[in-house]
Amino acid sequence: MADLPRPDFLELPVADVTAAQAFYSAAFGWTMTGFGPTYACTLTGDVDIGLQADPAEQTQAPLIVIQVADLEAALAAVEAAGGAVTRPIFAFPGGHRFHFRDPDGNELAAHKPD
């Protein structure tokens, strides 16, 4: 059986990335890597957690990110299945992704690591 796309990242909107990092470090022992003044994430290689403090980049709820082998094919499949792309493919440190809403209005993302 071929490897199926799977969620491998969860991005949380936060008000203060430094305070959020301190909380998750104290509560769960997580080590976060900073990517600028408004973003940090775990880098475990399993299901990682990102903290997004840039209001212009935040989603309104936690964002589930699904890893795919072919980003363009995933975008076409999402649209063909009735999903609505809310942010076209863009680059970020470590890969490329796009955001979409499923037919129930949930926002998710699909990404392909570099």
Image: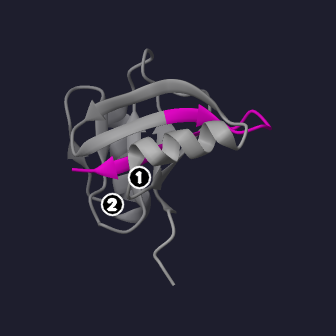
Residue type at the position of mark 1:
Ile
Depth check, front residue: 60 or 79: 79
Q: Position of residue 99 (x, y in %)?
A: 51, 33
Q: Work out whether mark 2 precedes mark 1 in sequence or the reverse, and give the earlier one.
A: 2
- Residue beneath label 1, please? 49
- Residue beneath label 2, please? 30
**Disc 2 to disc 1, how far (Cα)?**
9 Å
Position of 62 with respect to 2 (left or right) is: right
Q: Does 102 appear above or below 44? A: above
Q: Main secondary structure of the magenta part?
A: strand
Q: Does 106 appear above or below 112? A: above
Dot 1 alpha-carbon crowd within 10 angstroms: few under 14, some 14 to 19, many 20 or more:
many
Tell me whether the residue at label 2 lies in contact with that at label 1, contact meaning CB atoms closer than 8 angstroms: yes
Magenta stretch, residue numbers: 99-114
Depth check, front residue: 33 or 70: 70
Q: Position of residue 91 (x, y in %)?
A: 27, 32
Q: Is residue 111 magenta?
A: yes
Residue, x 59% and y 46% (percent of image)? Answer: 77
The total number of labels drawn is 2
Position of 59 with respect to 39 (left or right) is: right
Residue, x 45% and y 34% (percent of image)? Answer: 98
